[in-house]
Every structure is written in C-alpha cells, then in structure tokens.
Amino acid sequence: MNPTTLQIVWFVLIAVLFTGYFVLEGFDFGVGMLLPFLGKRSEPDGDKRRRLIINTIGPVWDGNEVWLLTAGGALFAAFGGWYATMFSGFYLPLFLILLALIVRVVAIEWRGKISDVKWRRWCDVGIGIGSWVPAILWGVAFANIVRGVPIEFRDPNHVYTGGFWNLLNPYAIVGGLTTLVVFLTHGAIFIALKTKGQMRQDAVKTAASLSLAMLVIAGTFLVWTQLAYGKTWTWAIVAIGAAAALVVVYATNKEKEGLAFLGTAIAIVSTVVLLFGSLYPYVMPSTLGSDQGLTIVNSSSSEYTLMVMTWAAGLITPIVVMYQAWSYWVFRKRLSIEDVPDTPAGLSLTDPDSVQTGK
C-alpha cells in the first residue's frame, strides 16, 4: 500500500522537528559539555567564567527543549505504532536520556539559588551529565533506527525482540561519536558567538581543534550511512554535509564564528535529512525481514487524525517559531566576564524573603 499525502507530510514534519531540536539543543549540549574545560576551577576567575558560559544559553535553553516535546507528541499522535515500538525497544537509552535531561534542568535552574561552592560544583557535574549522556545516546538511537533492529510482527503489534546490547554495534557507536563531536563543536562556536574578550578567543581555539575531529568522524558516519542505507538522491545531502564541515574548519581557523555556526547548523540538518531520507518509507526497519518492519503506512494514525493535526500545526507552529525567533533577537548581544558580578547571588539563610537570579 502506498503512503498517503498526509502520512508523507507528517513523516517530513517529524524530521523537521527533530532537526530543529538537534540544531538548537545541540549547542546547549555542547556548552554544558565544555563547561569544565573553558571554565577551569584552577583559574582565578574560574567561577565567573563558568557563570558566563551558562549565561550564554540562560535565556534560551529551556525553549530549545520544546522542540523535543513537540517531536515526541507528534510522533505519538501521527505514528502511534512507531512511538510504541521505539519507546519499548529503546526503553533503557531513552530513559537514560530523560533522566539526564531532568538532572540538567535542575542543575541549571538551581545552580545560583544557593551561594555555596560545593553546591555549584555538584550542579556543574549535573550539567555535564545532562549534556554528555544525551549527546551520545541520541546518535546511538537514530543510528540504530536507520540500521534496523530485531522487530517481529505479532498480530496486531510489532514487537522489539532484542536487548540493550543489540544497540551497541559499530555503526551505532560511530553515530554516537558523531553527535557528540558535532554538538561539542556547535557549542564551542556558540560560546564564541555569544561572548567577547578572552572567553571568545578560548572558545574559537577550542572550536578550531574540534572541527577537525568533526570533519573526520562525521564524514565517516555520513559516507557509511550513504553506502549502507542511502538512496541515489541522498548523495547530494552527503556532499552538502561534507562541504559544511569543511566550511567549519575554515571559519573557525579564521575566527569567523558566524560562518562557522552556520556551517555546523547545516551539517546537523544534512545528517538528519540523510537519516530520515535513508529510512523512507520505513520508520523502523527490522533485521528479521523487510515484511516485519514498521513503515509510515502500517504505523500511521487515521487520515482524520492526521488532518486535524495538520490544521492545528498550521495554526500554532508559526506563532511558536516567531516567539522563539523574537527571544533570540532580544538576547542577541555578546556577553563578557565583566558582565558577571564578583559575588554570585544566592539564598540568604537568614532572610527567607531574599530573591536571587544569578547563576
């Protein structure tokens, strides 16, 4: 059975939502992972540097996570079979991602609530865990989706018959390393884009070093994906992704962080388009046989459901995008270490009515 227009539309929309999530949340993860490296405690102004790094994403990081919530909701409503099989088969890695994101939220929100060195140190650990774990596991998860997993059709359900260790194969590990190094580079460039002075210089140097690793690892993953699972037209996507990675190497070495950020964004978009393009018309191929896998037809909701969702998305999505674009515009100025106060704000143990906002 051929897919309907609405089924194709929602497959593309889910790809767009995950693309937006990885582009925007990708630099959040990168900033969190680089926190202990660009804000070393051994330096005299180490704490101020860490607070400056966190402040670069302070106004936008929670809004970036909305893309994941929307993608998950759209997946559940448009392709219920895909959602059910993926979340049952990938239960442990997805649970670890969720747990890491929760730890990260708490660490960022509460880091500046108590003016205590040990407290901030533990919060920094939480930010690191909440950034490293998803950055790796998202790549592992999507690589396994493209590669295929053991799924057996048992009327009326598609049941995942593998285990956790099935997900740790060479292709998936390279996928995890790809998202890790791309997000690290993306985050370093974002810090350079949002800061000035010594912090910007340090971030640019870090990005220049990471860009070479990104070119090699991400290039390997793109070519591997294309040769093993790609289609004829996706060669163009591989070429665009490779060109974007080369632009990042050039731009970071020339300290052109604006061009470099555009390059990492295009590289992320190219990777997601390649993965979803390689999947179509499947959403979860099965290693037990093509007739056992999930497609956009046998995992889709009804046409009426898709039609209602299309109207809702058409009305609400432009408003959300405009609001988020406006928030980025409002907080577009660069920050410097001089903008960070010498003493972080914190709850006063003797004054319960005190209010603090510093991180």
Image: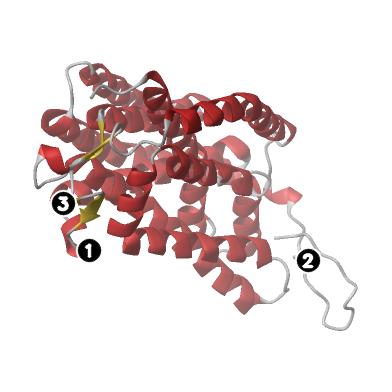
Tell me the quarter of the image containing the C terminus.
bottom right
Residue occupied by mark 1 = 164
Tell me how far mark 3 sits from mark 1, CA to CA.
Answer: 16 Å
Say which element carries label 1. Answer: helix
The answer to whether residue 151 is left or right of residue 320 is left
Disc 3 marks a residue whose amino acid type is Glu
The answer to whether residue 335 is left or right of residue 299 is right
Visible in this render: residue 42? no
Q: Quadrant of residue 344?
A: bottom right
Is tag 2's residue or tag 3's residue first in the polypeptide sequence? 3
Residue at position x 87%, y 78% in the image: 352
Tell me the quarter of the image containing the N terminus.
top left
Verify CB contact (< 8 Å) between mark 3 and mark 1: no
Say which element carries label 2. Answer: loop
Residue occupied by mark 3 = 152
Residue at position x 22%, y 56% in the image: 160
Closer to the camera: disc 2 or disc 3?
Answer: 3
Query: What colouring does the structure picture have?
Result: secondary structure
- Camera-side residue of 11 and 304: 304
Visible in this render: residue 162? yes
Residue 90's x, y, as percent? 30, 57
Is tag 3's residue or tag 1's residue first in the polypeptide sequence? 3
Number of other residues with Cα within 10 Å of mark 2, as a class: few under 14, some 14 to 19, many 20 or more: some
Residue 204's x, y, as percent? 48, 39
Task: Identify the mark at residue 345; answer none if there is no mark.
Answer: 2
Say which element carries label 3. Answer: strand
Disc 1 marks a residue whose amino acid type is Phe
Verify CB contact (< 8 Å) between mark 2 and mark 3: no
Residue at position x 38%, y 19% in the image: 5
Tell me how far mark 2 sits from mark 3, CA to CA.
Answer: 56 Å
Residue 217's x, y, as percent? 24, 40
